[in-house]
């Protein structure tokens, strides 16, 4: 592993345990096994390291979602995936993403860091709300609007549907973080929620497959799942 990558991993490990402000550049350098001046050859400052952690998290999470055919940040493209998805298919995608969020060490530590820092930094508090609440709800609202227009979802308020769908998933993800020994039980509850939501609100595509609305670019936090990355960096 290159020194630049080790710096990110050790910095994230320290940030996720102690918080951003409590960690010095010297402590990061010690954890990596280099002197502070050597660390500055790779990153200009602690802020620069922090910014790189955001970029790396986005890269990793995006690569994973692409691998399971979930097109992050584009509800129009995601409509092609979710237009006729079965309950089994939706459960599989959601459980895969939750499992990845829990067990990928980098992504998991990023979420822990963001959780800690939301109570210490106004900037991180705003970032946490944007990434783990606002963007997720806005994205699903837009996706559900498209699904309703395509005739594959019940005619209900898409904003309320987004809250009904995403909120239990985020709650259960947090429960897994706090009680990892209960993961199997929590994943069963997640599956029941997703199946009930699909059964209640998803409709079979119109006869002949229906006509999907014209595709246009849409930006959001993720597809039917919690987001882990992006947003403004720590100030």
Image: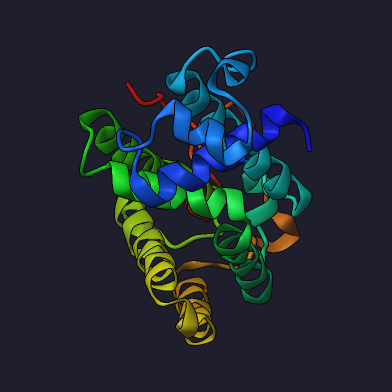
Please state the horizontal and vertical placement of residue 122, each as a whole percent of the image: 20, 31
Q: Residue at x 64, y 55 (%)?
A: 83
Looking at the image, residue 45 lies above or below residue 16: above
Judge from the rendering whether residue 53 lies leftward or rightward of residue 193; answer left or right: right
Q: Residue at x 30, y 33 (%)?
A: 21
Residue 218 in sight here: no
Front-lying residue, 163 or 52:
52
Please state the horizontal and vertical placement of residue 46, each as a whole percent of the image: 45, 23
Q: Residue at x 63, y 29 (%)?
A: 34
For the C terminus, give its image quadrant: top left
Front-lying residue, 60 or 139:
60
Front-lying residue, 222 or 175:
175
Looking at the image, residue 139 lies above or below residue 186: above
Please state the horizontal and vertical placement of residue 116, each as a whole percent of the image: 31, 48
Please state the horizontal and vertical placement of residue 138, each as a whole percent of the image: 38, 41
Q: Which colour scheme appears in the figure?
A: rainbow
Residue 206 occupies quadrant: bottom right
Residue 9 in sight here: yes
Front-lying residue, 177 or 148:
177
Judge from the rendering whether residue 13 lies leftward or rightward of residue 34; answer left or right: left
């Amino acid at each position: 592993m290159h020194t630049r990558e080790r710096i990110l991993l050790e910095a994230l490990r320290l940030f996720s345990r102690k918080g951003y402000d409590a960690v010095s550049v010297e402590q990061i350098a010690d954890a990596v096994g280099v002197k502070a001046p050597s660390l500055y050859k790779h990153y200009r400052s602690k802020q620069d390291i922090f910014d790189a952690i955001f970029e790396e998290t986005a890269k990793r999470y995006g690569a994973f979602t692409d691998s399971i055919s979930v097109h992050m940040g584009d509800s129009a493209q995601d409509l092609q995936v979710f237009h006729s998805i079965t309950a089994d298919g939706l459960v599989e995608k959601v459980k895969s993403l939750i499992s990845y969020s829990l067990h990928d060490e980098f992504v998991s530590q990023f979420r822990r860091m963001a959780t800690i820092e939301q109570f210490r930094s106004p900037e991180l508090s705003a970032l946490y709300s944007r990434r783990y609440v606002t963007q997720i709800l806005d994205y699903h609202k837009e996706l559900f609007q498209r699904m309703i227009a395509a005739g594959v979802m019940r005619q209900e308020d898409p904003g309320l549907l987004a809250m009904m769908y995403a909120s239990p998933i985020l709650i259960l993800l947090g429960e897994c973080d706090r009680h990892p020994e209960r993961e199997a039980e929590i994943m069963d509850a997640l599956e029941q929620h997703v199946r009930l939501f699909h059964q209640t609100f998803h409709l079979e595509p119109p006869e002949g497959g229906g006509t999907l609305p014209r595709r246009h670019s849409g930006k959001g936090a993720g597809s039917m799942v919690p987001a882990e990355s992006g947003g403004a960096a720590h100030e």
